[in-house]
Each structure stands twice: as structure tokens, then as C-alpha cells.
Amino acid sequence: MAVKHFSVDYNTINEHGTFSAGDTITGRVTLEASKETSLQSLFIKAKGKAEVKWTENEGQNPAVYSGKKKYFSLQILLQEGKGDGSEIISPGRHVYPFTFQIPAKEMPSSYMGKWGKITYYLKAKLIRTLWLIDRAKTEFTYLQITMPQYCSKILFFASGNISLDIHIETMGYLSGEAIKILVEIHNNSTRTVTPNFYLYEEQSFFAKHKRKVYTNDIIKERGDPVTASTRQTVTKVLTIPPQLPVSLLDCSILKLEYRLKVALDVPMAKDPEVKLPLVILLDKSIAAEERQQEYSWSK
């Protein structure tokens, strides 16, 4: 019990507590010793990686599918012993400052999914002897700044005597923003039909040439019914929940995509539906604010 406390922490650079490509992270490793103890080395690493893992039953034996993608790995040696155990840490509190610069390249934002995650973290390691090793770890939130923009979208669907003409203004939206959906329904059937509107997420995980998909409804709302032998335009506004994670489209083993689905509830028949891809974008005002705060802090 010579080491009473061992931790790593960092300084934030904006009120959101996020970092992006090219940002600098400063922090400290704190070590508190209750008595003298030997030291071989003390170092800290900064890492960013994606990993996925799931299990499937194939016959009588479960098959495990896993994959990893490393985005960067940096290491700083904070203190090094002589290798003969003669380097001694005195009793008391010792603080070791560090500075890392995140690589100036675009990487996917931090994310926790059903069968995978994208994490960025700092990990300190104190090697006292071959058998005595202390570790400390803390994660930080990485936010991808640049996201593609998208144009408007119109889709047409026809099935028998029913057709849909769907229009949305853009495919890219911010968390908390409203999606205005115009649906023109040509109901030439003898039944009343009702449109249902869905916003759902689709998480995809890839490993060993396999794909595992998890879907989850975020919003489900019912529209007004359209009577038989009529043509009607239905307007629906769906508000994206605040703090919804941004789309992840550039990770080779993990993707987070969003879909807008319009389905017609047709009595005693298969419900026709149309799916539109949506992209949840980073709020540019927040990104600009973070950049300004980072500049002020670094001067």
C-alpha cells in the first residue's frame, strides 16, 4: 500500500468539455505515496480508437465477432528510473504535468453504441517493479467539427391504388431542429389510410466480413387519416431531440445513421412505407464558440 492515490485528469478548454482535431490537452498525473517506494518508469498515453464486439450462435458453438480501429496513439515518459530499483519516490504528493496535441486530422466523434464504441482517453502507468504496476485512466470527449451538407429530397412511392410523394427541405439537421415533412397522398383505394411518421437510428457494426445492425425508434407520431378516393397533402413537423449524437459516417467498423420513415396504415393490407436517410450535423455556432474559447485560453 505504498501508493495511496494514483490518478490522471485534464483541463477543459470550453464549456462543453469537448476537444477536436488539432486541440491541445493539458493535465496532470497525481501520485500520493505513503512511504518510500521504488520506480522504474512513469508514462502517460493519449489514444483514440473504435472497437466492436458481439456474439452469434452458429450451430452449437457461439461465434465472437470483434474488430478494432486505431486513430492515434501518443506517449510521454514523465519519469524514468535507472532500472536497478535505485530511483526512489519519497512519501507525499507528487504532480507530473503533461501536454498532448490531438492529431490535426478528422476522426469520428466519441460514441457509445449497442455493440461498439468510439473512445478517446488518457491512460497513465506507473511501473514500480516487474509485479507492481499502477494504472489510471480517464476519457475525454472528441467532437468532429466538419460534416457534409445535404440537399433537399423528394421521393415518390406507388403501390396498387395508393401513392406517396414526400418532400423534406434538407437531409442535414441539427439536434433540437424541426423537420417539416410534406406528404402528398393519392388514395385511390376504397379504404381510409393513415400516415405514421418515424425517426429512428440505425447502428451498424462490422467485423470479419459480417454486419450486425441495431435499430431503435426515436420518434413515432401518427398523422391525420386520408379517406378513400381522395388526394390530400399532409404536413407533419417532427422535432429532433436535443443532445442527439451526430451521425457517424466515416468509421470503417461502426456507423450511426438516422432514417425518416413514413408508413401508411392500410387496413387488412401490407403497409407501404418510404425511408429517407437523415444526417444529424454538428451545430456550427457551438463549434465556432469552442474554437474561440480555445484561442482565448491558449494565448
Image (tube, rainbow, N blue to C red):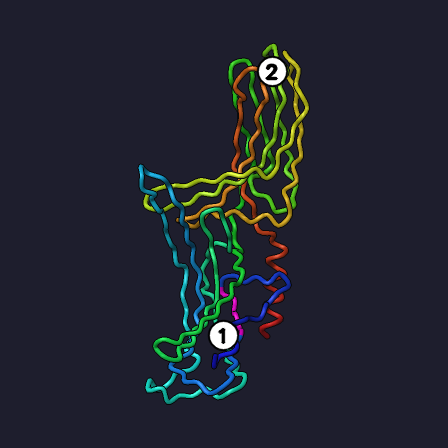
Callout 2 secondary element: strand
- Where is the C terminus found, in terms of image quarters? bottom right
In reply to whether residue 171 is colored magenta, the answer given is no
Q: Name the dominant secondary structure of the magenta segment.
A: strand
Residue 45: image tag: none
Which residue occupies 59% across, 67% down? 13
Residue tagged 1: 99
The image quarter in which residue 218 lies: top right
* Marks 1/2: CA–CA distance: 64 Å
Q: Secondary structure at mark 1?
A: strand
Residue at image mark 2 = 187
Q: Amino acid at mark 2?
A: Asn
Q: Residue at x 61, y 31 (%)?
A: 197
x 58%, y 37%: residue: 199
How far from the left and from the top, in percent, is residue 147? 52, 50
Horizontal side of 182 relative to 105 (left or right) equals right
In the image, residue 31 lies at what x, y percent? 51, 79
Q: Residue at x 53, y 40 (%)?
A: 201
The relative height of residue 196 versus residue 92 in the rendered view (above or below) is above
Q: Which residues are magenta?
A: 22-27
Q: 71 or 90, which lies in front?
A: 90
Viewed as shown, does residue 40 lie left or right of 174?
left
The extreme top residue here reads 190
Query: Residue 245: image x %, image y %?
Result: 56, 49
Of residues 292 and 80, the one drawn nearer to the viewer in this rendering: 80
Sequence-wise, which precedes: disc 1 or disc 2? 1
